[in-house]
Image (cartoon, rainbow, N blue to C red):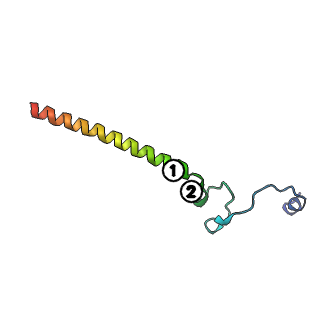
Amino acid sequence: MTFDAAILHGKEHREPYRKSARFDATCRPGGSCPYCRGNRAHKNDLKILSANEAINEFLGTIEKRLWEKWEKDIIDD
């Protein structure tokens, strides 16, 4: 069955193209163009940013503690 015949008989189930065609003309819902990926993965991107900030904060406090200990050891010598 050709594509046109499938549409005519209601056998075609692909989603139509969306408004994101101005970014990528071949984009369909759930596509991998930057526009669709950004919309779909926004929540995960925020979680990644939050995790990176927490890691940097944790490493910063450890570095500060090590630096203070090192200064204390030098002063005590």
| 32 lies left or right of 49 | right
Residue 47 place in picture, x, y as percent: 49, 46
Image quarter for residue 57?
top left
Residue 48 place in picture, x, y as percent: 48, 46
* Number of residues whose C-alpha sits closer than 10 Å to that of mark 2, classed few (under 14), some (14–19) or many (20 or more): few
* Number of residues whose C-alpha sits closer than 10 Å to that of mark 1, classed few (under 14), some (14–19) or many (20 or more): few
Residue 33 place in picture, x, y as percent: 61, 59
Q: Residue at x 59, y 60 (%)?
A: 35
| 72 lies left or right of 45 | left
Image quarter for residue 59?
top left
Q: Residue at x 77, y 56 (%)?
A: 14
Q: Residue at x 30, y 39 (%)?
A: 61
Q: Three-letter amino acid code at disc 1?
A: Asp
User: Which of the labelled discs sits on residue 45, or is there none?
Assistant: 1
Q: Secondary structure at mark 1?
A: helix
Which is nearer the N-term, disc 1 or disc 2? 2
Q: Tell how many labels.
A: 2
User: Which of the labelled discs sits on residue 38, or is there none?
Assistant: 2
The quadrant the C terminus occupies is top left
Q: Gap in Å between the C-alphas at discs 1 and 2? A: 9 Å
Q: Three-letter amino acid code at disc 2?
A: Gly
Check if mark 1's residue and mark 2's residue have beta carbons within 8 Å: yes
For this orientation, the residue located farthest to the bottom is: 22
